[in-house]
Image (spheres, grey):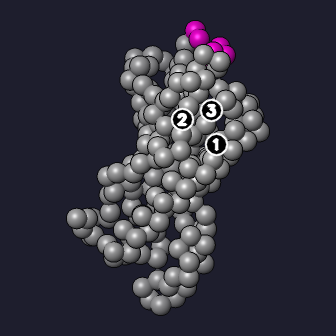
């Protein structure tokens, strides 16, 4: 397994009023990001593992959002805890269920950050893992830059029950996706 952090900008996202709303935003943003990496064989072309076998599998891949604008999100004992601008607030508050002012957020830019965990069943060397990381990062960057992330996000926010109107009015900013802090398994060193 390896892990790396990412950030991207989203235009038009109204700030969450409470931790429940931030958690809802995060779930939809994560699910949409998880659509961004196709089947490992497609993405990596024909590749054999280190035993010479051509494995058939989908890369187990999981995105987790840890920051939406000024709100930080962590998971403690399976529950979301918010920090940053929502620090000290309960999961819900008197504003829970209130519709945010989507129109006034139209020109705002929110920075979204998190990490992605990849279970790699093919690679065990540093070179191979680093190549796989670069291919995933490139694929996600293309997913966002092409506008396909925005389309998938709007679709997911619309079809989900209940729908999430604040995310239906957003768009990912092309060229804003960045990655950093690649963490490889302890038996592999990272320069």
Q: Which residues are magenta?
A: 94-101
Q: 163 and 168: which one is in front?
A: 168
What is the CA distance from the residue labelled 1 to the residue labelled 2? 9 Å
Q: 61 and 127: which one is in front?
A: 127
Q: Position of residue 112 (x, y in %)?
A: 47, 36
Quadrant for residue 12, please give it. top right
Q: Indicate the secondary structure of the residue bearing disc 3.
A: loop
**150 sits left or right of 73 in the view:** right
Q: Which residue in the protein does label 2 denote?
A: 10
Q: Position of residue 34 (x, y in %)?
A: 58, 52
Q: Which residue in the protein does label 1 denote?
A: 150
**Where residue 170 is drawn, which disc sits there?**
3
Rate crowding at label 3 as few (under 14), some (14 to 19) or many (20 or more) other CA atoms within 10 Å. many
What is the CA distance from the residue labelled 2 to the residue labelled 3? 7 Å
Q: Position of residue 128 (x, y in %)?
A: 38, 75
Q: 185 and 110: which one is in front?
A: 110
Asked if 95 appears above or below 67 in the picture, the reply is: above
Residue contact between numbered discs 3 and 1, judged by CB atoms under 8 Å: yes
Residue contact between numbered discs 2 and 3, judged by CB atoms under 8 Å: yes
């Amino acid at each position: 397994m390896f892990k790396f952090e990412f950030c991207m900008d989203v235009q038009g996202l109204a700030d969450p009023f409470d931790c429940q709303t931030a958690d809802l935003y995060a779930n939809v943003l994560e699910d949409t990001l998880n659509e961004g990496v196709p089947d490992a064989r497609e993405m990596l072309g024909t590749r054999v593992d280190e035993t010479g076998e051509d494995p058939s599998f989908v890369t187990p891949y999981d995105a987790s959002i840890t920051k939406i604008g000024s709100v930080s999100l962590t998971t403690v004992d399976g529950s979301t805890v918010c920090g940053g601008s929502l620090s000290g607030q309960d999961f819900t508050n008197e504003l829970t269920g209130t519709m945010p002012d989507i129109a006034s957020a139209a020109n705002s830019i929110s920075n979204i950050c998190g990490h992605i965990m990849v279970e790699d069943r093919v690679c065990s060397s540093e070179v191979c893992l680093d190549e796989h990381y670069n291919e995933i990062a490139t694929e996600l960057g293309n997913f966002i830059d092409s506008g396909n992330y925005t389309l998938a996000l709007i679709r997911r926010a619309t079809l989900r029950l209940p729908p999430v109107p604040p995310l239906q009015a957003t768009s990912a900013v092309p060229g804003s996706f960045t990655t950093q802090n690649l963490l490889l398994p302890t038996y592999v060193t990272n320069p």
